[in-house]
Amino acid sequence: MQPLKTLHDTIIHCTICPRLTRYRQQIAQTKRRQFQDWVYWGRPVPGFGDPRSRLLVLGLAPAAHGGNRTGRIFTGDRSGDWLYEALYRFGFANQPESRHRDDGLRLTDCYVTAAVRCAPPANKPLAGEFEACRPYLLQELRVLHHLTTVIALGKVAFETYLKAARELGHSLPAPKPTFAHGSVHTLPWGITLIGSYHPSQQNTFTGKLTRPMFHQVFRIARQRLDGKVHP
């Protein structure tokens, strides 16, 4: 647990990216009308979950009025509503929703993190911001010794994980794994990489991602972790 706590403390105090630092602080000051009574977190958001987890869920970045407000990844926004409901349904969380850091949510055998730790303008980090933030993901992958399965929420997260794996010295298979919703890739270093559309409002409101589609991704992960063959 200590290596993760040390890493979390480092992440929280990061100011490497000037654009992201300005934006998250500005959002924390102006707030959204419905959250005027909140004291916004307004800092980089660390990962969250079980330090002995076998499942890693990798997203894009905190939401401006979600994680940037609450201080916990995927907490307080609609994407988080989808994610934690699915984690609860398949036995990775003790409750189906996440509203704030002290709401009692606990994850079992699951750790949730993001490619970028600060809320980005228009939810679009720049290439240099991904590069600056990747060392934090690399360190998480180094200290989460029990990982066997990664769910990448979106193509960007999928590619981010593969870049991180290569930086850790792993040789990618040929042909290189490609992203698709529900795709399952068994990688040579012992990780099963599962692709999923991100549960963003853009995807869920348009029907590109439905609840059954999202649940199927976590059903696959659960079956893999339980040693069952995916049908």
Image (tube, rainbow, N blue to C red):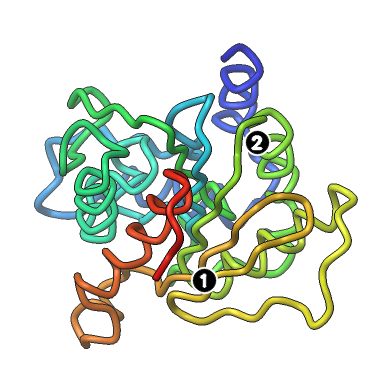
Image location of residue 36, percent across then percent down: 14, 43
Residue at the location (71% across, 69% down)?
A: 127
Report how far apart the C-alphas of labels 1 and 2 lie in the structure: 22 Å
Instruction: State the mark number for residue 140.
Output: 2
Is label 1 in a helix, a strand or a loop? loop
Q: Which residue is mark 1?
A: 124
* 35 sits to left or right of 114: left
Residue 103 position (above or below residue 154): above
Q: Residues within 10 Å of mark 1 (few under 14, many from 20)?
A: few
* 49 sits to left or right of 32: right
Is label 2 in a helix, a strand or a loop? helix
Q: Quadrant of the N terminus?
A: top right
In front here: 90 or 78?
90
Q: Quadrant of residue 20?
A: bottom right
Residue at the location (69% across, 76% down)?
A: 177
Amino acid tagged 2:
Glu
Q: Quadrant of residue 212?
A: bottom left
Residue at the location (38% across, 50% down)?
A: 222
Q: Residues within 10 Å of mark 2 (few under 14, many from 20)?
A: many
Image location of residue 153, percent across then percent down: 46, 65
